[in-house]
Image (spheres, rainbow, N blue to C red):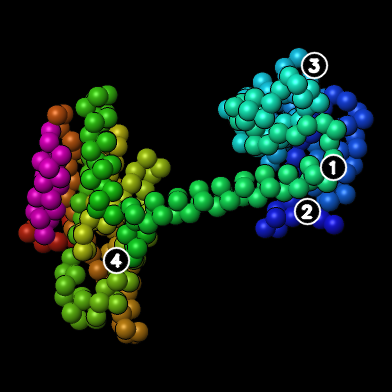
Amino acid sequence: MPFKTNKIIPRILIVDNDPYIQDPLRDFFEKFKIIVFVASNAQDAIDLLKIKSVDVVITDIDLPGMDGLALTALIKKEYKADVIVITGQTEKYSYKDAIDKGANDFVFKPVHFYELLIRLKRVIKERQLRKERALLIKKLEKLVITDPLTDLNNSRHFFNQVSLEIERSNRYNHFLSIVLLDIDNFKLYNDSYGHLEGDKVLMKLGRIITSHLRNMDSAYRYGGEEFILLLPGTKKMEAYIVAERLRAAMEKEKLYPANDKVHVTVTISAGVSQYLRNEERESFIKRADGAMYKSKEDGRNRISVS
């Protein structure tokens, strides 16, 4: 009968130098369609962990060279596997000895295979619950920093990140620039076609911005129809080129609001500023904002640099 949890087939590693334990255990677990690897000592186990994905290591304490407790500590420090420790030396080792080294369970010999299977199931289940919990926490953390409409970061996250980048810029004398951009005549577009169509424009611009970002860059919905890009390691004229590419890409987009057969275009205006050493955060952002409003005053659909 296959042993599956949430359609995942467990992968285990048995570490024991006694073939009268190792071989029967492997045969037993394989009957349940568990993927089994074996090693006779700690070094062989480590070499295998470097190249194989393993969920649980079942190891004896008494091994040649590095013992099973030292191996357990190393696995918990450097690998992602859980560990069940086995020993026949009941007077020498205790449950606390194994748990202190990071083991997930501790079993005394003689080993009853079905009992070990039950313990393995428990360790696997707890492992999956931890993964699911970590994934949920990661999703919740993303929700906290993400604008739900555009899937870009939100303004709260921007202020945290720009402060960190300013600190790095001052410490290492790195270049840092921002691009603040705004959709031209967006209120008129909303009034003409409705807010649902306006939301589509925001989502479209969000996708365009994402497609033009380098790995080191980040983008944020700053508020309403305003967006801001944080560009570490970037001089202002390099940032200008990034902004110009976004402006040109948005201008080329053909929009058909409310299924109108005639397309319309939407443009953006942007301001660029490069961080000045020891400048206050608010001043840095204000210069980009001023440059963006200059673009508006000069006729829109253009980039200005502060």
Residue with the mark numbered 4:
202
Residue situated in front as seen by the camera: 242 or 140 = 140
Report the side of 93 relative to 76 (left or right). Answer: right
Residue 239 visible, this orientation: no
| The magenta segment | 279-296
Residue with the mark numbered 1:
113
**Mark sitting earlier along the chain (1/4):** 1
**Mark sitting earlier along the chain (3/1):** 3
Residue type indicated by callout 1: Phe
Q: Position of residue 188 (x, y in %)?
A: 16, 75
Residue with the mark numbered 2:
3
Who's the residue at 33% across and 52% down the image? 145
Cβ atoms under marks 1 and 4 closer than 8 Å: no
Residue with the mark numbered 3:
64
Inter-mark Cα distance, 1 to 4: 60 Å
Q: Mark 3 against mark 4, which lies toward the viewer?
A: 3
Inter-mark Cα distance, 3 to 4: 64 Å
Q: Mark 4 against mark 2, which lies toward the viewer?
A: 2
Which quarter of the figure is the N terminus placed in? bottom right
Label 1 residue SS: helix
Label 3 residue SS: loop
Inter-mark Cα distance, 3 to 1: 24 Å
Who's the residue at 38% across and 44% down the image? 214
Inter-mark Cα distance, 2 to 1: 14 Å
The 10 Å Cα crowd at callout 2, few under 14, some 14 to 19, many 20 or more, is some
Q: Quadrant of residue 203?
A: bottom left
Who's the residue at 82% across and 31% down the image? 109
Label 2 residue SS: loop
Report the side of 263 relative to 237 (left or right). Answer: right
Which quarter of the figure is the C terminus placed in? top left
